[in-house]
Amino acid sequence: MTVYGDKLDEALAGASTENKTVIIAIINKAYVEVDEPMLDIFLDGFWLGEGTEDLIKHLLIVAMDQTSYRRCKFLHLHCYKLETNGIDFGEKLYMSKDFIKMMWQRTRFLGDVLKRGYNFIFTDTDVLWLRNPFPNLSHNNSIDLQISTDGFNGDQWSKANPINTGFYMIRSNNKTITLFDKWYAKKDNSTGLKEQDVLQNLIHEGEFRKLGLKVMFLDTVYFSGFCQNSKDVKAVVTIHSNCCRKITAETADLIAVIHDWKRFMSATANETSRFHWTPHDHCRDSWRN
């Protein structure tokens, strides 16, 4: 059993909006130690985005080791150190055993946040926030979960959409707490699967329907990624470096996105009509070796 103590309550309360909603990102030393740290790129999105700068005060950075915690404190962010029983959380190659272990640790922690009565947007740090997402998320209290997709099929209620757990908004209630308990309980019987695959399986097995969960799947026009680029730079809200295997490839291609965004922001109307994203070559090549 993980004991969080009052420090987590303090951290959540410090970052919370009036309606008990927090933006949560989880980092480790691999995201702060290199020349172009992922955490810095992530924060650049808030700095350069439209209507995103003020959201920093609702961002809680959860650090999985002392190195990333120190970096978070140095940046004067809301920080919480997650005790991980001596596990080394440096860079983990996508789908390696340690990567999967790290993802399950994350799932357990986020379930505990729900149990404390907080709604949250979870965001991976390899998601650039280029616009404030709240206007594009439903404020209907009956919707329990709004989750990003690797490829949107055109129907926001279709459970056939391939989900991505790198960005989602979830409300704290008995249904979502039960979902996280059921999700985490699958970790020892899911060899070779990451937590996202297990959640997708729960959808296909009808678990969401049994729990009475109302789920909305987010359109990649607004909540996009490298798997499926947004077709409209004037509408895009977030960009996730999904379909990528290594942090070095992610950072290189995310920096290209930032350059694209700066180019768009300073372009004339004539130039924006011809705008296109730089190809994500580093991420594409990351699967070859």
Image: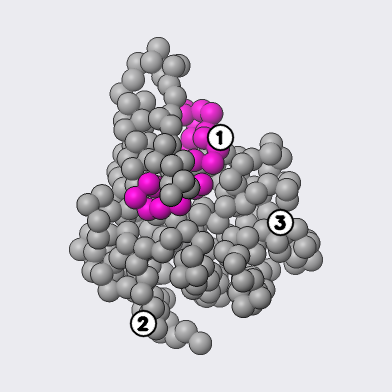
SS at mark 1 in the image = loop
Mark number displayed over residue 86: 2
Task: First in sequence, mark 2 or 1: give its number.
Answer: 2
Residue with the mark numbered 3: 214
- Residues drawn in magenta: 226-250
Q: Is residue 38 above or below residue 72?
A: above
Residue at x-position 32% and y-position 26%: 263
Residue type of the residue flagged with mark 1: Val
Task: First in sequence, mark 3 or 1: give its number.
Answer: 3
Residue type of the residue flagged with mark 3: Lys
Indicate the quadrant where residue 45 lies. Answer: top left
Prevailing SS of the magenta stretch: loop
Are there few (<14), some (14-19), or many (20+) residues within 10 Å of tag 2?
Answer: few
The x and y percentages for residue 116 are 52, 75
Q: Is 186 part of what is drawn in magenta?
A: no
Q: Is residue 26 left or right of residue 148?
A: left
Q: Using the numbered discs, state the Cα–Cα distance from disc 2 to disc 1 in whole angstroms.
A: 41 Å
Q: Is 249 part of what is drawn in magenta?
A: yes
Residue 108 in sight in this render: yes
Task: First in sequence, mark 2 or 3: give its number.
Answer: 2
Mark number displayed over residue 221: 1
The x and y percentages for residue 171 are 59, 62
Residue type of the residue flagged with mark 2: Gly
Indicate the quadrant where residue 84 lies. Answer: bottom left
Q: Is residue 190 left or right of residue 100?
A: right
Residue at x-position 52% and y-position 33%: 230
Residue 15 in sight in this render: no
Are there few (<14), some (14-19), or many (20+) residues within 10 Å of tag 3?
Answer: some
